[in-house]
């Protein structure tokens, strides 16, 4: 029986204890990053260094800057209200806030952020996105916000059929909308195999949570909709499509508040947060294990063949079939639940929405 072993590695894990000695041999990475386990830090630093073409010491400095920048970004955009048009982290992990006027720009600068004057307001972009999402859904397409270009992006995969009306509507909305074409298809990542299993289906264990002294896993809704009883306990709820979150009662007696890193170590998850474009992230899943990347878009609607899901997080971290339900996180902060994938992209249900929907708290 491997149930306890599986769940002990399931909630939020990124760095392996066995790698600590090797990790500390590099002067560039000897400095720890708050909230990151040694293994998660090692993977995140290596991934960022390779992707950005920077030294390991520069990658460490960037990751140490990120947490404070995310906090500044959320505080400033909240204070500005409608005068702010979202924001993101730049290549140096510094906060950039899109604004509509110079007075708002001055306020951003005073708060320690970088202001960027943009053309389209949040309401203008939301109106464009809503108009596109009101059309009949086309499978293998997505619609999301790109704060770096101040646009709504319509992504059309090769597998999409009947997208003419969508593309015509996107063109009519002018420069508020950009169309991108990608190879392949967009699909949920459910698959047969092991990890958490039931009915011949495999998914990945999500975040361990509790309510009233009872332990639960928040997982992907397309997993809990498909399977009523898992090897760890019964499904207790599913919201899919529309959302992609579900609940599984954890009857194993093991429900640590940590994510497995697949090398015997884990990453402690101490809080839930909101993903930010440009933020470096990690994900843990039963197929691709620990992978790293960055958030590329938020508030994304993905039109899977099984149905549309809205308000997803889009990243470039690798996921594959069997990773469904796994954990997206940044250090000790939980961000999302693996939903699906496209060509070079991965999609995640924000974890905070699932926690609120089921009234559960992270362990």
Image (cartoon, helix red, strand yellow):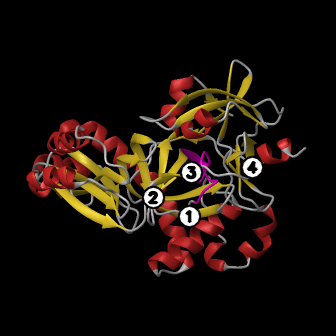
Residue that appears at 78% across and 62% down: 263
Nearer-N-terminus badge (4/3): 4
Q: Label 4's element?
A: loop
Nearer-N-terminus badge (2/3): 2
In space, the residues marked 1 and 4 are separated at their CA atoms by 20 Å
Residue 356 x %, y %: 51, 26
Q: Kindly report which numbered mark, 4 or 3, lies closer to the viewer in this rendering.
A: 4
Q: Residue furthest front?
A: 162
In space, the residues marked 2 and 1 are separated at their CA atoms by 9 Å
Residue 176 x %, y %: 15, 53
Nearer-N-terminus badge (2/1): 1
Q: Which label belongs to residue 195?
A: 4
Read off the magenta span: 320-335
Residue located beneath label 1 in the image: 292
Residue that appears at 51% across and 25% down: 357
Residue 137 x %, y %: 31, 43
Q: Are marks 2 and 1 in contact (CB under 8 Å)?
A: no
Left or right of 10? Residue 245 is left
Q: Which label belongs to residue 329?
A: 3
Residue 323 inside the magenta-drawn segment: yes
Left or right of 165? Residue 321 is right
**How would you rate the neighbour count of disc 2 (Cα within 10 Å): few for under 14, some for 14-19, many for 20 or more?**
many
Q: Closer to the camera, 178 or 24? A: 178
In space, the residues marked 1 and 3 are separated at their CA atoms by 10 Å
Q: Are marks 2 and 3 in contact (CB under 8 Å)?
A: no
In space, the residues marked 2 and 3 are separated at their CA atoms by 12 Å
Nearer-N-terminus badge (1/3): 1
Residue that appears at 44% across and 48% down: 275
Q: Is residue 16 visible?
A: yes
Q: Which quadrant does the N terminus fall into? A: top right
């Amino acid at each position: 029986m491997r149930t306890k072993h599986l769940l002990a590695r399931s909630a939020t894990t990124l760095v392996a204890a066995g790698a600590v000695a090797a990790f500390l041999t590099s002067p560039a990475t000897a400095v720890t990053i708050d909230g990151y386990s040694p293994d998660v830090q090692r993977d995140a630093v290596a991934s960022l260094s390779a992707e950005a073409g920077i030294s390991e010491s520069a990658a460490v400095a960037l990751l140490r800057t990120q947490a404070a920048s995310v906090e500044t970004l959320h505080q400033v955009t909240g204070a500005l209200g409608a005068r702010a048009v979202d924001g993101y982290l730049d290549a140096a992990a510094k906060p950039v806030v899109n604004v509509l006027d110079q007075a708002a720009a001055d306020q951003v600068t005073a708060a320690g952020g970088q202001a960027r004057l943009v053309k389209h307001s949040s309401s203008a972009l939301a109106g464009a996105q809503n108009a596109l999402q009101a059309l009949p859904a086309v499978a293998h397409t997505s619609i999301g916000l790109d704060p770096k270009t101040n646009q709504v992006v319509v992504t059309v995969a090769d597998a999409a059929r009947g997208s003419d009306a969508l593309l015509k509507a996107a063109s009519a909305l002018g420069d508020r909308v950009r169309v991108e074409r990608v190879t392949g298809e967009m699909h949920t990542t459910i698959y047969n195999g092991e990890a958490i299993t039931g009915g011949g289906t495999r998914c990945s264990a999500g975040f361990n949570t509790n309510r009233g002294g009872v332990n639960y896993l928040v997982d992907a809704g397309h997993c809990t909709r498909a399977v009523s009883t898992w090897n760890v306990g019964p499904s207790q709820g599913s919201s899919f499509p529309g959302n992609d979150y579900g609940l599984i009662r954890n009857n194993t007696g093991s429900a640590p508040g940590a994510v497995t890193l697949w090398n015997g170590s884990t990453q402690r998850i101490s809080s839930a947060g909101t993903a930010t474009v440009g933020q470096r992230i990690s994900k843990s899943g039963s197929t691709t294990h620990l992978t790293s990347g960055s958030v590329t878009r938020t508030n994304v609607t993905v039109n899977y063949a099984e149905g549309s899901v809205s308000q997803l997080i889009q990243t470039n971290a690798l996921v594959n079939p069997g990773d469904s339900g796994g954990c997206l996180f940044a250090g000790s902060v939980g961000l999302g639940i693996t939903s699906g994938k496209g060509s070079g992209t991965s999609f995640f249900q924000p974890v905070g929405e699932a926690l609120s929907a089921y009234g559960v708290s992270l362990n």
